[in-house]
Every structure is written in structure tokens, then in C-alpha cells.
Amino acid sequence: MEQHEHGGHGDPGEHGRHSHPGEHDELQNAAEFAGVPDAFQRLWTPHRMAYIEGGPQPHIDECPFDRAPTLSDEEGLIVARGEHAYVLLNLFPYNSGHLLVCPYRHVSTYDLATDAEVAEMASLTQTAMRVLTAVSNCDGFNIGMNQGRVAGAGVAGHLHQHIVPRWASDANFFPIIARTKALPQLLGDVRAMVQAAWPAPAAR
């Protein structure tokens, strides 16, 4: 068989030839590209490039929730900053738009938070729900805190609350059988979208 420069086999045909940007405005059927069709579906996961290009993660002894506020919003995946707490995207999201609400102070459990921290975390959680509903049309939420490593806290030393948007169609065989989540949006795109929709703080 002749090997084509596209890396597949067979006649590339009209749709298999190289095209220049702007030459074709219509969507093209992937089945018509050069290559040999098979029985497999392709799961494209461009969000993984965020981890690949990001290089090594911070040292395990460094608390990511202490570090995030010292970075720019883009680098720290921060959506909103309050006086006592802030909101950021989860680096390992369960769903697109999976947010975390954290106090700036390094405390491990909810009972150690001050009244001001608790009140602001609650207010930020409500705002996050409204924003996510507006930008993603989600149907519900999972909201909760894992207190301590024995309870499943990934970063047990720093209190954080999860806000996970849910859709009626987001439960399928992938997470149940394959322990895999398909995420359609890049983290940076989600962060920018949520931050843009976040209401400005009221004047004091």
C-alpha cells in the first residue's frame, strides 16, 4: 500500500488534501479523511496538554492552596478573590467547572475556620452556583468538604470546599466502568469564562 503523508493508508481524496486556513468554512466529516476506518471511537482530550505543558507540579510538601494566591489568576486558576477566602478551579476536575472555595489561612478542618471565613466561603459558594448555572446551564451541584485524609481529602492540611456542576446527561459508563472523565473544555478557557461572569464586588 502507498503511504501518504497524512500517516494513514488509502486514497486521501478531496478532503484528505492539505488545506490552507480559511479555505474551507464548513465542517468536514472525519470519516472522509485519509486513513483506514475502524470500529473505535476517538476521545479527544486536549485538556491533558495543560498538565503536559505545565511541567513538574509543586513539591508535595508545598500546599497548593497556600501557593495559588501568590500566583496570577491565570497561573493559579483563580476565579475570584475575597477578603478571607478565594475560588479556583480544581486542577483535577470531576466535571468542567469544578470549583474549590478555600480560606487563605492554612487551616485543616471546618471547625477551625473563623466566623468571617465561614461566612465568606458560604457567600462565594452561592455566587459560584449562580455563575456556573448562568454560563453552563447545569442541572444541579455536588457541594461538600472532605475533612482529613481518612475522609478522602486530597489536600488534608488546607480546608477546601468542592462545587461540582452536574448535568442530567453527565452519568455514563466512562466514570462508572473506566474510572475516566471526559472533559470538553480546557481549564484556562473555563477559568476565563467563569471569571468573566463573576459579579464585581460591591463597593464598601
Image (spheres, helix red, strand yellow):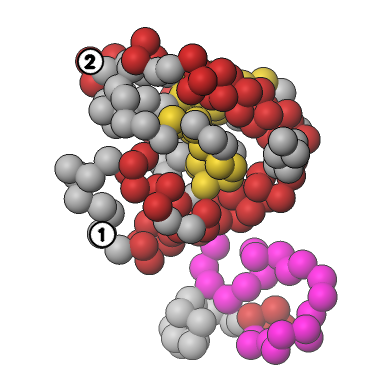
Total label count? 2
Task: Say which of 184 and 115 sits in front.
Answer: 115
Residue 173 visible from this viewpoint? no
Which quarter of the figure is the C terminus placed in?
Answer: top right
- Name the element at disc 2: helix
Task: Say which of 55 and 109 sits in front.
Answer: 109
Q: Is residue 119 above or below residue 90?
A: above
Task: Say which of 31 and 19 sits in front.
Answer: 19
Q: CA distance from mark 1 to mark 2?
A: 26 Å
Residue 150 visible from this viewpoint? yes
Residue 111 drawn at (x, y percent):
37, 10
Q: Which residue is mark 2?
A: 150
Q: Which mark is residue 56?
A: 1
Residue 46 drawn at (x, y percent):
50, 59
Outermost top residue: 111
Task: Say which of 135 and 6 sits in front.
Answer: 135
Magenta range is 17-41
Residue 8 drawn at (x, y percent):
48, 76
Describe residue 74's horizontal placement relative to residue 64 as left or right.
Answer: right
Residue 9 drawn at (x, y percent):
49, 78
In the image, residue 105 lies in the stretch drawn in magenta: no
Say what amino acid the circle numbered 1 marks: Pro
Describe residue 27's horizontal placement relative to residue 51 as left or right.
Answer: right
Outermost right residue: 25
- Name the element at disc 1: loop
